[in-house]
Amino acid sequence: MNIATTTEAADQIREECCILNEGAGSWAFEPLAKQLSVALGIAISDRPRRFNYLLNLENVGLTAGQASFISQEAIKLASDKRLLAEVFKKAEVPTPETHLVETMDEARSVVRSNPGKDWCLKYPTGCGGSGHRMIDETVVEPRNWPKPFVVQEFVRMKRAEVYRTYCAGGELFGWMVRQFPEDTAVSPWVAHARGARYADRGEAPATAKEAATKALSATGLLPSFGCVDLMPGRDGQWLVLEVGTDGLVNHVDRELDNPELERQMNLRIAAAFWKAAKDTTDGNRTSQ
């Protein structure tokens, strides 16, 4: 194949790809859609194409012959802590002790049966710590709370902090800590939206990488793009809190106060996206 033919094939693949951002919630993804459009060199569309970077999808669906870079199942898992708890348990991903219970009586029983531990009730579809609350034996059922309830041990630290690593195309990169500045009022939930900020911590410990890889593999995010939030446990163990990815209801925070990591993230996502797009194209040709 000569250069002209190769270029034509690449252009054809590019025309078959898009940043898919459709529906009433698409406005929330517009800044990221524009950023990804520049990084990947593809258009933003409100209609699916053959290969999509899925950000929002409400009124149309993907049909046979249309694919998503980040699988829709992985996006669904990342958006619901109830589903994550089940998947993590099955895959033996190390996490803080977590219970899925159907009633507040069961939640109170968990607290009562574990004296000396702190417990929280996590809002299952919230992000940035939204809706989470500490609980004790007197907890009363919140109104309109999705079930089952996610009751998780709250591991207290001298200084509240959460660590994060990222993956793209099967490779981990970056090791950031999220914590509150010294002069900021702190919250039990170390979220960027609550005033926490990121700082680079160099290379992730091997045990943290192992836990993160297990979580990403279990949720199907490892081949595409995602992140893992972790915290140190006992005896050098790292505990996975959750995974995150782009699409439908949320997206991975890019405001890291670290231009080099932000640049690296775009490059790695682009490389993983185009490899997946080409593999999908080659697979379609083989099956024809």
Image (tube, rainbow, N blue to C red):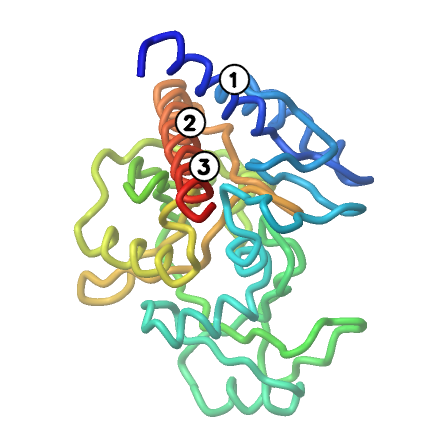
Asked whether the viewer can see residue 178, the reply is no
Out of 150 and 263, give the one closest to the viewer: 263
Marks 3 and 2 sit apart, C-alpha to C-alpha, by 16 Å
Horizontal side of residue 65 vs 231, given as left or right: right
* Crowdedness near tag 1: few (<14), some (14–19) or many (≥20) residues, C-alpha within 10 Å: some
Nearer to us: label 3 or label 1: 3
Residue at 50%, 17% (x, y): give it. Answer: 11
Q: Can you tell which mark lies on residue 41? A: 1
Could you tell me if the residues under marks 2 and 1 are in contact, i.e. CB atoms within 8 Å? yes
Residue 138 lies, in percent from the top left, at 65, 84
* Crowdedness near tag 3: few (<14), some (14–19) or many (≥20) residues, C-alpha within 10 Å: some
Out of 71 and 51, give the one closest to the viewer: 51
* Crowdedness near tag 2: few (<14), some (14–19) or many (≥20) residues, C-alpha within 10 Å: some
Residue 26 lies, in percent from the top left, at 74, 35
Horizontal side of residue 197 vs 80, given as left or right: left
Residue 219 lies, in percent from the top left, at 43, 60
Q: Which residue is mark 2?
A: 270
Q: Secondary structure at mark 3?
A: helix
